[in-house]
């Protein structure tokens, strides 16, 4: 496989054909913020948080192929401002009340807001969805009011679990994740599914019953480190 | 899946659904056709029907539901046997839609978005159906009604209630009419100016015959040399698009005609599909020869279902005459055929990736680019997607030569363009003009000299004010897919903008965050201006949010949806600043305490001891 | 170095849980340092109920859920040079704003109060009445963030913010050196 070089924020890295900008950046230990992308799952390019400038053009890093000689801007004030807008949009689209959410501290949306300095009120209105919580399954609950439509559960269930428990329905602002049946209990979802595991749902939408608040405040994943530390850590090592 | 569900959805309980699936060979790529047929048969797509379709096509039920819930013309709730869809475009609103709605509601005894208890009638809104030149308009099942008035509505409802079919409203001899006669009786042509290329006299298949004397590479050279650019709005060189597709190694290639014109205010393809369907198919056939495609699709927007028979007839006729199918015009190896794909109410399907997704039986979501459709499109094969007008031009260019076409128009914008003119003007309709005319010249022709604002290119284009009516209709100045909507000084610019934002909210596919969520925020923000609840900073907020949506959206819809706001902020700044309420002593005047406590006041049956000053006096 | 006049601080708890005021006390012994720089005016901590002087800084906990909150917040805006929202409720409504998300019926406030006081599954209210004493301020149609009612100058996120964050933010603001928060210290819970 042919390899070539490109630069991200002035740092020259190596990439190979078939890699996306994000693949190459990950391998080189440069973190590009993302929410809908997750290691081991197909790239979707939906959340747009991974927007970067490649040769001056805004693209989603998770879907844009790496090319020889590409100049990529990642952590610029302008791009981080765009990302903050996107993260704020997601906060306002759903009901994200961190103080009462069991995902708090382990939530990628929240952690991304920390990383992007989301500290002041925004001008965005809250859309305040009012969808019923699906607690039909003995081991799993689903609160789609907290869903950010990243689709990671859909891809994980389809491609890794080979099940297809989840899917998108509807269009536009009404597009949401739904289950393959009248409710979650009537699907073949299982607590041991990859799609149900903590790493797949970035927020508090898929809830594993009887497992909440396991780690005390101060010891949760993003209490300890900024999101992206694992990838950035590769470079520091 | 639970046993009970399986029993409920035994295929034998749904023989028609099984039959429909089998008509399409249980092919999941024909999902849209299957679901449309079920919708027509049962007036809705039930959960059980989705189960059956899933089983027949080998998909999961949630995948079927994903498609069924995406398109506006498909529904999971039962619709009336006669579904009346009122065109809700701003042009229709200004042409008296409110009175039409009132007439339908009172005559039918149901409100908008309701179905009559006996299941006969449903009443709903639908965005622009491509009849802005004859608004207010409506679809009644597959029948188009135009120039509606409350009197006409009363007559229509009375006749439908007496048992007449929607078709009978057009003619009592409807079944005996030819498809073309049917179309003509439903919809006015409104050709106001015929140009040299498309709407003037056109010899039959002269371009196709001329193309036989050329190699595929020479055909592409000819089209490229003509300067022809995509007429749907984006303006990409047609010849270059073809070249990319032709140069990609593949077993199959496809030509898709984009007949999904959904930009509010556009209806020129409707006229071409009615008046020049043979020219369109001729253009597609030439394109097929040029890029080496054997298969083609015409993607017809659901709103133009009344043209389906007309196009099917044209395709059948051409097959019979050896102009489609195997060995076209007797030429060995020149095989090409076309199927018609009906859309089902989704503006975003005008985007070429979304259109391809839709043809593949998926929700109409744009595809990730790259790869581009010319290298990996329909079913993964190189696919050329061209607009109706572009393909018609191709046939004429092959007949008259690239120089002839190149010689018309201006530098960079060659040939002629169809403009769909509607709104506040005396002669709405289609104008074929060489590129380079000014907006003022077009307004003069259309009897719209009094315009205060003109929307060039529809909501994803530019709204200009009187002081710039000398701007030119070219790719370099005011690029447009052809929609020209004229607004007089009586019209409220903010009302227009809010309408168009609600259109984009309705039509966003929802795949990416900025377009799905950001457009809702923009619409709400414009609403705040209209209600006088905006503060000074909200003007910057509109610009700022628009910039984020444009820069981060995944496809052209989100990249252009803020244009109604941005172009009016630029060209009509006073309509915004006049509505702004500045803070007083840093207290927001936009927070209205009286309305905020009004509910509680009623509930508690007492007044405010803080804010009702005369309390107790 | 000449002694600067002490900054006057006022605080208020609107629709909050008082947790942010408790967190103010979590500054612990640094409170003594802080008191060298500031003096408290109107505040639940001093039990002073009206402004005695114009203040340099007003600290607001909680959003606005009733008319009194609006009244107090406006009073603070008029009497303070700088307004700092402290905690998630001030910033975005916080937990009280949960009611906004369920208020989609024709009579949302009635429905909300009836569920809270009469029909809710776990309610034991023998009077079967919604409290309606004239001394009770009227509820707003929804819960508002402070910045929707008045212009705010700064916000300290958290539920509640830690004593450390409060102390560092206040002292850097007083010194005119506030440049935003360290990412590692931002928390929404």
Image (spheres, coloured by chain):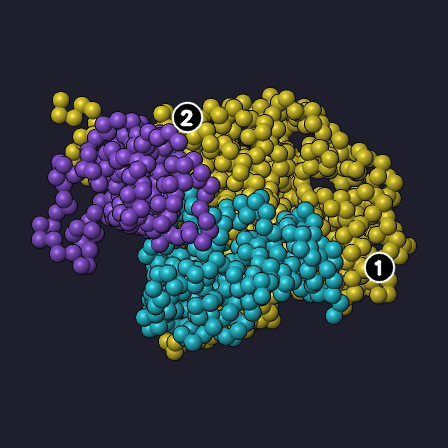
Q: Colour of chain B?
A: yellow
Residue at 35% in and 46% down = C166
Upstream in sequence: badge 1 or badge 2: 1
* Label 1, residues with CA under 10 Å away: few <14, some 14-19, many ≥20: some
Q: Chain of mark 1?
A: B
Q: Is residue A86 above or below residue A146?
A: above
Can the viewer see residue B169 in this picture? no
Percent position of residue B382, x then y: 73, 61
Q: Which chain is purple?
A: C
User: Which residue is found at the position 38% from the left and 59% from the top?
Assistant: A104
Tag 2 subunit: B
Residue shown at 75% from the left, 34% from the top: B435
Residue B329, numbered circle: 1
Q: Residue at x 16, y 33 (%)?
A: B606
- Is residue B438 depicted above or below C163 in this figure? above
Q: Where does label 2 land, which residue?
A: B582
């Amino acid at each position: 496989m042919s390899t070539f070089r490109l630069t991200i924020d002035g740092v020259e890295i190596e990439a190979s054909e078939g890699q996306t900008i994000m693949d190459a950046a990950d391998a080189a230990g440069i973190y590009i913020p993302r929410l809908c992308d997750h290691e081991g799952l197909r790239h979707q390019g939906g959340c747009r948080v991974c927007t970067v400038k490649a040769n001056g053009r805004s693209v989603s890093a998770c879907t844009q192929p790496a090319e020889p000689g590409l100049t990529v801007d990642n952590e610029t004030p302008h791009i981080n401002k765009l990302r903050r807008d996107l993260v704020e949009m997601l906060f306002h689209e759903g009901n994200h009340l961190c103080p009462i959410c069991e995902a708090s501290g382990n939530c990628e949306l929240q952690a991304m807001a920390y990383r992007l300095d989301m500290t002041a009120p925004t001008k965005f209105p809250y859309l305040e969805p009012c969808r019923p919580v699906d607690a039909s399954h003995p081991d799993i609950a689903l609160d789609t009011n907290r869903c950010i439509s990243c689709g990671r559960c859909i891809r994980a269930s389809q491609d890794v679990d080979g099940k297809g428990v989840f899917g998108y329905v509807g269009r536009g602002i009404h597009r949401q994740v739904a289950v393959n049946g009248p409710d979650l209990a009537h699907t073949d979802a299982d607590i041991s599914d990859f799609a149900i595991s903590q790493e797949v749902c970035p927020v508090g939408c898929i809830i594993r019953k009887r497992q909440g608040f396991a780690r005390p405040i101060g010891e949760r994943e993003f209490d300890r480190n900024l999101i992206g530390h694992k990838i950035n850590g590769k470079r520091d090592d | 899946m639970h046993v009970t569900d399986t029993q409920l959805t035994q295929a034998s309980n749904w023989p028609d659904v099984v039959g429909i699936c089998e008509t399409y060979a249980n092919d999941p790529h024909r999902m849209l056709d299957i679901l449309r047929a079920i919708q027509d048969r049962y007036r809705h797509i039930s959960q059980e029907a989705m189960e059956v379709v899933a089983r027949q096509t080998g998909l999961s039920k949630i995948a079927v539901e994903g498609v069924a819930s995406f398109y506006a013309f498909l529904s999971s709730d039962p619709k009336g046997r006669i579904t009346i869809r009122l065109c809700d475009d701003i042009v229709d609103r200004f042409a008296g839609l409110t009175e039409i709605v009132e007439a339908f509601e009172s005559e039918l005894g149901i409100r908008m978005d309701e179905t009559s208890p006996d299941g006969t009638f449903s009443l709903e809104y639908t965005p622009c159906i491509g009849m802005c030149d004859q608004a207010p308009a409506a679809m009644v099942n597959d029948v188009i009604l135009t120039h509606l008035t409350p009197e006409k509505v009363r007559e229509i409802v009375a006749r439908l209630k007496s048992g007449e079919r929607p078709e009978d409203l057009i003619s009592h001899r409807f079944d005996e009419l030819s498809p073309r006669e049917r179309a003509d009786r439903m919809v006015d042509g409104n050709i106001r100016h015929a140009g040299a290329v498309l709407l003037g006299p056109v010899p039959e298949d002269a371009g196709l015959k001329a193309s036989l004397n050329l190699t595929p590479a020479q055909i592409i050279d000819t089209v490229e040399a003509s300067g022809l650019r995509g007429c749907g709005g984006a303006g990409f060189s047609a010849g270059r698009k073809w070249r990319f597709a032709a140069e990609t190694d593949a077993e199959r290639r496809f030509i898709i005609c984009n007949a999904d014109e959904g930009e509010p205010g556009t209806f020129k393809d409707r006229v071409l599909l009615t008046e020049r369907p043979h020219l369109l198919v001729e253009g597609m056939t030439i394109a097929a020869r040029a890029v080496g495609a054997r298969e083609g699709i015409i993607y017809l927007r659901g709103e133009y279902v009344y043209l389906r028979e007309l196009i099917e007839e044209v395709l059948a006729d051409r097959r019979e005459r050896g102009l489609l199918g195997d060995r076209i015009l007797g030429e060995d190896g020149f095989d090409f055929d076309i199927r018609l794909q009906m859309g089902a109410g989704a503006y975003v399907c005008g985007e070429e990736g979304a259109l391809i997704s839709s043809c593949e039986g998926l929700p109409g979501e744009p595809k990730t680019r790259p790869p581009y459709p010319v290298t990996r499109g329909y079913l993964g094969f190189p696919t050329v997607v061209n607009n109706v007008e572009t393909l018609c031009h191709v046939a004429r260019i092959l007949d008259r030569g690239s120089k002839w076409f190149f010689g018309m128009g201006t530098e960079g914008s060659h040939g002629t363009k169809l403009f769909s003119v509607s709104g506040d003007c005396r002669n709405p309709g289609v104008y074929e003009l060489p590129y380079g005319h000014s907006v003022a010249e077009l307004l003069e022709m259309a009897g719209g000299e009094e315009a205060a604002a003109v929307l060039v290119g529809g909501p994803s284009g530019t709204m200009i004010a009187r002081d710039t009516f000398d701007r030119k209709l070219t790719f370099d100045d005011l690029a447009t897919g052809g929609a020209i909507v004229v607004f007089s000084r009586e019209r409220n610019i903010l009302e227009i903008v809010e309408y168009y934002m609600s259109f984009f909210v309705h039509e966003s596919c929802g795949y990416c965050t900025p377009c799905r969520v950001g457009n809702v925020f923009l619409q709400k923000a414009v609403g705040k201006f209209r209600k006088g609840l905006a503060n000074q900073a909200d003007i910057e907020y509109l610009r700022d949010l628009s910039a984020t949506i444009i820069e981060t959206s995944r496809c052209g819809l989100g990249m252009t949806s803020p244009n109604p706001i941005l172009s009016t902020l630029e060209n009509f700044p006073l309509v915004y600043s006049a509505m702004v309420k500045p803070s007083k002593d840093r207290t927001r005047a936009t927070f209205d305490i009286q309305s905020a406590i009004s509910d509680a006041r009623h509930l508690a049956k007492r007044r405010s001891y803080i804010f009702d000053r005369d309390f107790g006096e | 170095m000449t002694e600067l006049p002490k900054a006057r601080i006022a605080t208020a708890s609107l629709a909050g849980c008082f947790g942010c005021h408790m967190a103010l006390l979590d500054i612990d012994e640094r409170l003594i340092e802080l008191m060298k720089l500031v003096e408290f005016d109107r505040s639940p901590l001093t039990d002073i109920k009206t402004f005695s002087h114009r203040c340099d800084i007003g600290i607001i906990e909680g959003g606005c859920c009733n008319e009194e909150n609006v009244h107090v917040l406006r009073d603070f805006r008029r009497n303070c040079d700088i307004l700092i929202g402290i905690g998630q409720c001030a910033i975005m409504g916080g937990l009280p704003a949960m009611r906004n998300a369920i208020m989609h019926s024709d009579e949302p406030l009635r429905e909300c109060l009836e569920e809270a006081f009469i029909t809710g599954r776990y309610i034991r209210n023998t009077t079967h009445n919604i409290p309606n004493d004239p001394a009770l301020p009227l509820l707003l149609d929804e819960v508002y963030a402070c910045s929707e009612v008045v212009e705010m100058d700064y916000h300290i996120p958290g539920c509640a913010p830690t004593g450390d964050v409060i102390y560092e933010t206040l002292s850097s603001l007083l010194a005119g050196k506030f440049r935003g928060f360290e990412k590692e210290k931002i928390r929404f819970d």
